[in-house]
Image (spheres, rainbow, N blue to C red):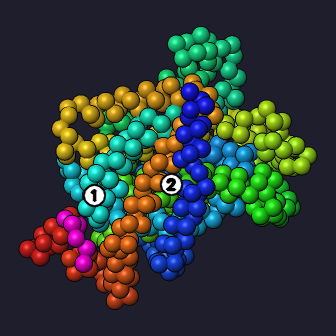
Amino acid sequence: MTDLVNTINGFVWSSALVWLCLGAGLFFSLWTRFVQVRGFPEMLRILFSGGESREGISTFQALAVSLSGRVGTGNIAGVAAAIGFGGPGAVFWMWVVAFLGASTAYVESTLGQIYKEVDEGQYRGGPAFYFEKALGLKWYGWVFAIVTVFACGILLPGVQANAIGNAVDLAVGGGEPLATPFGEVSLAKLLMGAAVTAALAVIIFGGVKRIAHFTQYVVPFMALAYIISALVIIAMHLGELPGVFRLILDDAFTPMAGFGAVIGWGVKRGIYSNEAGQGTGPHAASAAEVEHPAQQGLVQAFSVYVDTLFVCTATAFMILITGAYHVTGIDPSVSGGALAASVDPNSPAFTQLAVSEVFTGLGEPFIAVALFFFAFTTLLSYYYIAETNVAWIKRTLHVPGLMLLLKFALLGSAFYGALRAAGTAWAMGDIGVGVMAWLNIVGILLIFLIARPAMRALRDYEAQRRAGVTHYTFDPKALGIRNADFWEERLARRGDD
C-alpha cells in the first residue's frame, strides 16, 4: 500500500507540476501587473469593510475560513518536511511560490465570486462552478468535484489528524502500544483520534455558518499566539538571524539535497500550506458577501501572505535558528542540523524540539496545542469544501444521503488518520493536493485564454476605485462576462428598486 501510494505521488508531483505552479504564478503576476504588491493597501482596507448577510458570510469570516484551510499542519510539520527532505533552501522556494501564488489566488478566488450561486439560502461557488460556466465544460467540473470530495473528504483529513496524534504522542509519551483493529497504536493517539472526531462531529453537523463563526475567532488568535512565540525565540537568537538568511539563500541555489529536491519540496509544501492554485480557496471566497468579485480576490491573495510569509517563515526560523533539524541522507555536520536522522521530518518533531531548545519542557505541549487548533480548523475547512462540491453534484445527481455519507467518511478518515504512519498519511494527502492543483491551474489558464473574466473584473474594480465611488457595482454583461447569473440578477433587483 505504501509503495503504491508513493509511486502515484511521485507521478502526480513530477517536475511538470512544480514548474506549472511557478509558471502560472509568474504568468498571472505579469498580467495583473503584480496585483499582490500594488493592491496590498486595498487588501487591508477591504478586509474589515464587509458585513454578513442572510446568504453570505463577511469578508473577514471568509478570510478566516480560508485561512483555517491554509494555516494548518503544513505550517508546522510541512515546513519541517520541506527542510528535512529538501534542505534549508526549500524555505526560499516556499517564499517564491507564495509571492507568485498570491496572484493565482486572486484569479481563482475572483472567478469563484463571479460564478457563485445561491444554494438553499447560502452562497456556493468554486472551481466546479466556474469550469461549468466560464469554460462550458460541465464534465470538467464533474471531474474536479469528484476529485475534491475524495481529496478533502478522505485523503487530506488524515494528514491533519495524524499530525495532532503525533504531536500529542511526543508531548505526553505514547506508553505501551495497544492492539487495535488498525494495528498497534499508543493510547495517546487512540484517545486523541476519538476526541478530534467527536469535536469535529459537533461542528460539521452545524453547517457553514457555525464553521465561519468558529474560525473567525480561533484562526486569528492561534496564528497570532504562534507568531508571537516564534518572535520571542527569534529575539533570543537575534545575532544568529543573518546566518539563517544566508543559509536559506545559499542552499536555495547550491542545495544540499539536490536542485530538484530543494525546489520540489519547497513548492510542494508551499502549495500544501498556502493552497494557491490548488482550488480550495475559491470555495470560502465564494461564500463572502461583497460588492464586487475583485474584492474577495484581493483578500484571498492577502491570506497567502499570512500563511506562508508569516506563519511558515516563523516555523522555519525557529527550526533553523535552533538547529533542530536534519536533512535526509546528509550528515548533520554537513547540513548544520543537530537532530539525529531517526527523527521523522514528516512529523511535528522538528518544531516541537526547536521550541524546547528555548523553553525547556514546554515545546512539545505548546506545539501540540497549537497544532490541534491549526489542524482542527483545517479539518473544518476540508469539510466545507467537500460539502460545496457534493452540493454541486446534487444539482444533477439526486441521490439522498450524500451529505450524511460525506460527514461520516470525513469523520472516519480523521479517526483513522490519527493512528496512521506519518509518511503514508502525508503521501496520500499530497496526491489529493497534486491532482486538484493540476485540474485547477490548467482550468483557470484555459479560462484566461478564452475570456479573462478575472482580469476584466480587476480593471473594472480599479476604474471604480479611481473614480472614488461610494458603493461598488459589478455588471458582468457590460464587461463581456457571460453566465455570471448571480451578479446579473443582483443588478436587475437593484434596478427595479
Which one is closest to the eye, mark 2 or mark 1?
A: 1
Residue at image location 31% in from the left, 37% down from the top: 206
User: x, y percentage for residue 242?
Assistant: 83, 64
Q: Which residue is mark 2?
A: 275
Residue at image location 49% in from the left, 26% down from the top: 415
Residue at image location 23% in from the left, 57% down from the top: 117
Name the disc covering residue 137, or none.
1
| Up-down relation of residue 164 to residue 481 (above or below) | above
Using a 10 Å C-alpha cutoff, classify the residue at mark 1 as few (fewer than 14 neighbours), some (14 to 19) or many (20 or more): some
Q: Nearer the viewer, residue 437 or 355?
A: 437
User: x, y percentage for residue 406?
Assistant: 34, 33
Verify whether residue 234 appears in magenta: no
Residue 241 seen in render: no
Extreme residue in the left direction: 496
Please give the range of residues in magenta.
480-485
On the rendered structure, is 259 left or right of 196?
Answer: right
Name the disc covering residue 228, or none.
none
Residue 463 seen in render: yes
